[in-house]
Amino acid sequence: MNLLTDDIPRKRRLRAGMVGGGRGSFFASRHRTAMRLTNRFELVAGAFSSDRHACIEAGQALGVAWDRTYFSFGDMAAAEAARDDAIEVAIIVTPNHLHFEPCKLFLEAGIPVICEKPLVHSSEKARELQRIAAANETFFAVTYTYTGYPMVRDARARIRAGEIGQVRFMYVEYLLEWLVNDPSKLGKGGVWRGDPAKAGPTGALGDIGTHAFNILEFVSGLRCTALNANLMRTVDSFGLDDTDVIQLEFEGGANGLLWSSLAAPGHRNGLRFKIVGSKATIEWRQEAPETLTVSRLGEGDLTYRRGHGDMSSDAQLATSLPAGSPEGYLEALAVLYSDYATALEAGRNWRGALPGAARRRLRRAAGRSAFRDQRQFFSFQIVGCLPRLRADEPMIFYRSLPR
């Protein structure tokens, strides 16, 4: 139970490069912090910004050598692939519309990729990246941070062990309040989220709805087979949907409901799921991540706490501190990076090297399919959900293709 704190014996640090992440980047510094927490990565190269000055500034601040500070990700992919000491993984933290090309170039060069979610804007591009990665047997992952929380992995293990019985209904909400204020004041790291050319065809759904969907499939182990999506815009000055309500159907007959919003006053980072089974209901909240509640039929409620001896083995593997010493968001992202480091060290045998929960997540990812009607797709690829919904068609129904 010391995943991030055991530093003896020394473990080899993997050479990493980053695309994006210069001044003004919203999330890149959290990736770098998680990498440092694992003590398994060394940032040695980067194309940090399309602005030359910002790229140089980031390279100097992060200690990257001048000859490995690149002014385009194309130059970076070509130069790194030719080096004897080439990077061992490329980390993509650009805005959404700039994910596809760098992922493609690095995967074609045989360099593993870790990409910020959502992966791309269309199922066709997702399938192309998946094909390239599979052809080269190259590790390829998307960061859905909340699956790294120990008690999320504990919930998954308890459901798999039958503690709540047969899954009958699932509910997930992810509510934020930041869009209620003037969107024009979001700054460089946030204003693009309302621009369809950069964020893609959805706003709240692609930004946080993907997290909510991903965590339901991850925890339950069930695949979504159909959905009915209502995409709404309640903030007129925002260019995309800011609130979504989605009815879900899952294999095995379970139903679900997903509610995501960027404009819900009073909600700071309100991700919460509740899974109802035939014997009990299991519930977890991101803002109180140390506990997991199981409400049993005709019996007293149970509260499981991170760090105690009754955690599942999956949760124990993701834990670093004893009970009473809180672990939070950055540790959860670092758990994912620890999974990635274990996989990357195994090379082409990465599937067998992953810890149990992450291995099951990636194995299921290989079998994701696309849902379609005559106009568009809603696809699930790699380790998450990649929406392709038009904000001007708010009511859309999808059913899975015949298997």
Image (cartoon, grey):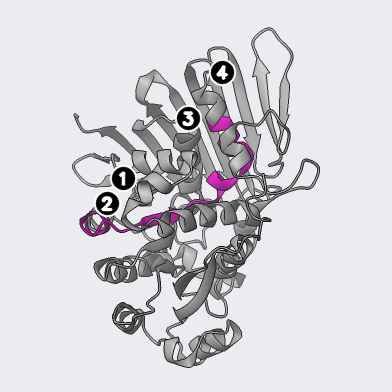
Question: In percent of the image, x 52 and y 57: which residue is there?
Answer: 337
Q: CA distance from mark 3 to mark 1?
A: 18 Å
Circles 4 and 1: CB atoms closer than 8 Å? no
Q: CA distance from mark 2 to mark 4?
A: 34 Å
Question: In percent of the image, x 42 and y 61: which residue is there?
Answer: 114
Circles 1 and 2: CB atoms closer than 8 Å? yes
- Per the image, label 4 sits on a secondary structure element best described as loop
Residue at image mark 2:
123
Residue lying farthest front?
Answer: 9
- Per the image, label 2 sits on a secondary structure element best described as helix
- Per the image, label 1 sits on a secondary structure element best described as strand
Query: In the image, which residues are magenta?
Result: 129-156
Residue at image mark 1:
379
Name the one closer to the observer, 324 or 95: 324
Question: In percent of the image, x 59 and y 42: which residue is there?
Answer: 317
Name the amino acid, label 3.
Ser
Name the one closer to the observer, 192 or 353: 353
Circles 3 and 4: CB atoms closer than 8 Å? no
Q: CA distance from mark 1 to mark 2?
A: 6 Å
